[in-house]
Amino acid sequence: MSFPLLTVTAALPAIGAIATAAVPAAGRTAAKWLALLFSLGTLVLAAVVLVRFEPGGDRYQLTESHAWIKDFGVRYELGVDGIGVALLALTALLIPFVILAGWHDADPSPASAGDTPVETKKYRWRPTQGFFALILAVEAMVILSFEATDVFLFYILFEAMLIPMYFLIGGFGDRAHAGSDENASAQRSYAAVKFLLYNLVGGLIMLAAVIGLYVVAGSFSLNEIAEARAAGTLDMATNTERLLFLGFFFAFAVKAPLWPLHTWLPNAMGEATAPVAVLITAVVDKVGTFAMLRYCLQLFPEASKWATPVILVLALISIVYGALLAVGQRDIKRLVAYASISHFGFIILGIFAMTSQGQSGATLYMVNHGISTAALMLVAGFLISRRGSRLIADYGGVQKVAPVLAGTFLIGGLATLSLPGLAPFVSEFLVLVGTFARYPVAGIIATFGIVLAALYTLVLYQRTMTGPVKAEVRGMPDLKVRELAVVAPLIALLLFLGVFPKPLTDIVNPAVEHTMSDVQKKDPKPEVEAAK
Amino acid sequence: MSATAVHSLWTTAAEPIDKIPAPTVEYAQLAPALIVVGAAIVGVLVEAFVPRKVRYHVQVFLTVVALVAAFAAVVALAAGGYGTTKARIAAMGAIAVDGPALFLQGTILLASLVAVFTFAERRLDPEAHGNRVDSFAAQTASVPGSDSEKAAVKAGFTTTEVFPLVLFAITGMLVFPAANDLLTLFIALEVFSLPLYLLCAVARRKRLMSQEAAVKYFLLGAFSSAILLFGIAMLYGYAGSVSYAKIADVVDGSVRTIDPALADTMGNDALLLIGGAMILVGLLFKVGAVPFHMWTPDVYQGAPTPVTGFMAAATKVAAFGALLRLLYVVLPGMSWDWRPVLWAIAIITMLGGAIVAITQTDIKRLLAYSSIAHAGFILAGVIATTPDGISSVMFYLAAYSFVTIGAFAVVTLVRDAGGEATHLSKWAGLGRRSPLVAAVFAVFLLAFAGIPLTSGFTGKFAVFKAAAEGGAGALVVVGVISSAIAAFFYIRVIVLMFFSEPKAEGPTVAVPSPLTMTTIAVGVAVTLVLGVVPQYFLDLASQAGVFVR
């Protein structure tokens, strides 16, 4: 038997989570380093996966398959295609930065540490260990969900990752808030509960569809269902397929999130600490869009085509609505959240445009959005931690005081608005081209999203960084070494993938071809050729 | 002349009368129930003859040994093939020894064993007058708050009768799912119900509430027993027999000979329908299904918490076992009649339990309504009427009972000056005071909510899958909707424990003895094992999923 590389890649952060959680209360710093080491180890393993993966090879590679729950027909089946490998690498890449950026986020607040050391000791409350353990637990589950090729296994992870996320949002809020402590704590648990309930309802509806799928197909294995479909033995009535598709899609649309199921995201991202917000939008939400590509299109190709018009309209609404609301935000983190909703609209648009450019673009978009949002959000987090406020109006003239911070913030912002030369441009361009080829009107409307993106990013920069230096901003320290170590690699990556996206497209394209053949769609011929 | 010769002069020998046949009883096959009932009787003698000082230790030892021995007997029977190939009907047709019976008996015995540990817990309450006390009243006969009660507390009395009582209840529960005729069913029901009514009344703290709960439980339980008995009479009138197999034959129409004494009633479908419905009502009452659930919240809240945990878990297993056997063995011929009814009951039970639970402010009442919602989920599996339906329901019961006992065991730990602090507001910030206890309780809540990687999810998935395959897809949809509603209140408790600031005058978490720790540890272990690697137990349930008739 070959070495179970995929299992080990997912197991390492899980072990790390347990190890970190087991560190005694006094060893806070040790816990942090331990978590960082485990996340770096996972990154190394992810790199090995990336190297071992052959872009032109089988559809699913590095496969593993073991019996798990025979009674339910469930197997522990893993395998990665190009899309999975790209997102796995993204996850493994971002987590060390998330940990590093959140280095001090879960320290006991100075007030409680100073005033009531006895209380802390008596309660045996170890928030720091918990924080990093939960991050690693999320990483493990997200990675495994990208690797799963069994619907049941995927479903379990899809649901289970909500729990650590929920504790991360509700248990470790942003210290920078408006109003009293009491109020902040109430808002935080509101955000956490909203996050959990939205996603749980989505997941439970998916559960009904998962069971329905098993009743219809008699298997949970993607491979077996694909074989049955190819052999023509899979008999799925049109209406059944549509209902099952809707069950799956609903869950993914909540997770992604797609308008009008998006309302939990601004709350969650606003109340969570910046690293956790990155974890939500850059890592966990990607599972939703990934699953649309992997499960909706592959399992229910006919229903996907049937639903395409409605989904495209919803995606367009997401793009424009998210961008418009981002323009109107007063809170930096909520602004980034609404920008993300707009970007998820682009991703979903690309997936359901049903062109290979659109889908490659969407996959690249997932990766690039992860990196660019991480860069913007983490710098925003550094900024917010300095001033203790999330409100845009509380800032001004920061670039004169902290030029490096302002510069990195600008690059993150420019990446968000898809400036050519930075990575997101490539993906956004591909999505738009791919959409335009089949649905020109949708392509045109989506372009407005870019214009609005320029507006909200540049206005954000202008209001916070330029202009006269505000009194409270004076004396604001510039980025520290730790913070630079977080931001610099992300920016380097944005530049590299912006200029040279080929390594990524090479991995993604074959997988997209497979998905396209699943839905039996061919790219529309270019107009000129058709005219001949 | 000999005596015989004399009376033979004026008497003639009649044909020899048919002797009443001596019943054949297969003692070995009935060993689990016999061991427990034997221990219960010995327990009564212990109460009478053993000195007060050592009674507690003797009773605990006796109870634990009896339960372990009975479980060993179940395992031995199962290993001997009585669950599969050698399944048979013992004791002159009264008791079935088959897969479902053995599986459920094993579940009841293990669940009772861990529940009994919480009965024996004596470290939670502060010592009274130098004596360790448990959750039960010093002297149940004394009026709450009276001088006689104070004297009893001062003298260090304890109600060690709870151990024989619980053994009697377990006996009834062991027989209940194995009962193969209606009379045995009724007797088993009474054997486990009467001790439970008593056990509900013996709380040490909040005694009036406990007595009120017991009275309510008793009155409603007596009504339901009467209805059940009336139903049995009607079914006898319909079929001319109380034996499951014979009634089933008459229902199927394969028996056409009519007992002359019952010529007026036999084969009268009205009797069958009314009688069947009344028996169902009796069983659904024990299960706690809407609209027969009214007793559940009050009794769960008022009873001593160890009793609540035991009752919530073991009664549900026994009652669902009996329900399954009745529907699958006696009444499969009329499944067109009972399925729509149970559909409706399952739907209102799932939704009713979940919706009403949202407004609860007491943790024990909340768990009571949650148990109602779970009864609805289990009913969805019962309705499947497939072999998977049987095994999934049995798996769910096994999974659910350990989660329930574990959860109630945690409830006993959170205390303030008035005993257990069951009001939800007092649980605020528990996660900061005692992260471990709160985390364990969170695991149980997540299992109740059916989050993957816990036994609750596996069980829910099993019954929903069985229901979907049995053609009850709509029930599955209602099931997931009510799961979503239910998730809300489980999560509310987690929010309260972890995300609220602890209150200054909040409750403390008592450090329990190894007994309660074992209960909770077993609960957590079973919850996680059945969630992550359930294959062995699912296999066991599906091997055991064939009734004998």
Image: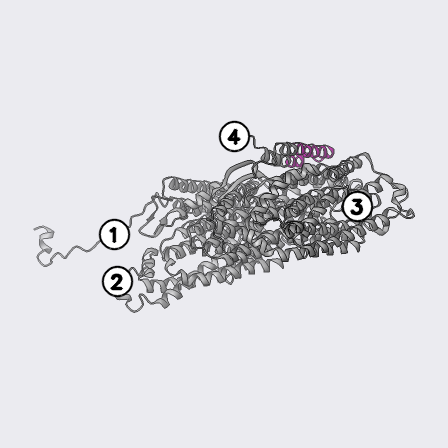
Badge 2: chain ID? B
Marks 1/4: CA distance?
A: 66 Å
Q: Which of marks 1 and 2 is nearer the N terminus?
A: 1
Q: Tell me the crowding category of disc 4: few under 14, some 14 to 19, or many 20 or more residues within 10 angstroms, Cα based.
A: few
Badge 4 element: loop
Q: What stretch is highlighted in magenta?
A: A16-44
Marks 1/2: CA distance?
A: 24 Å
The label shown at residue A413 is 3
Badge 1 element: loop
In the rendering, at what x and y percent does residue B2 appear? 9, 50
Q: Kindly identify the residue that appears in the image at 41 percent across and 42 percent down.
A: B74
> Which of the two marks, 1 or 2, is nearer to us in this view?
2
> Which of the two marks, 4 or 2, is nearer to us in this view?
4
- Evaluate whether label 1 is on the same chain as label 4: no
Badge 2 element: loop
Q: Mark 2 points at which residue?
A: B257
Q: Name the residue under label 1.
A: B21
| Left or right of B63 on screen, residue A196 | right
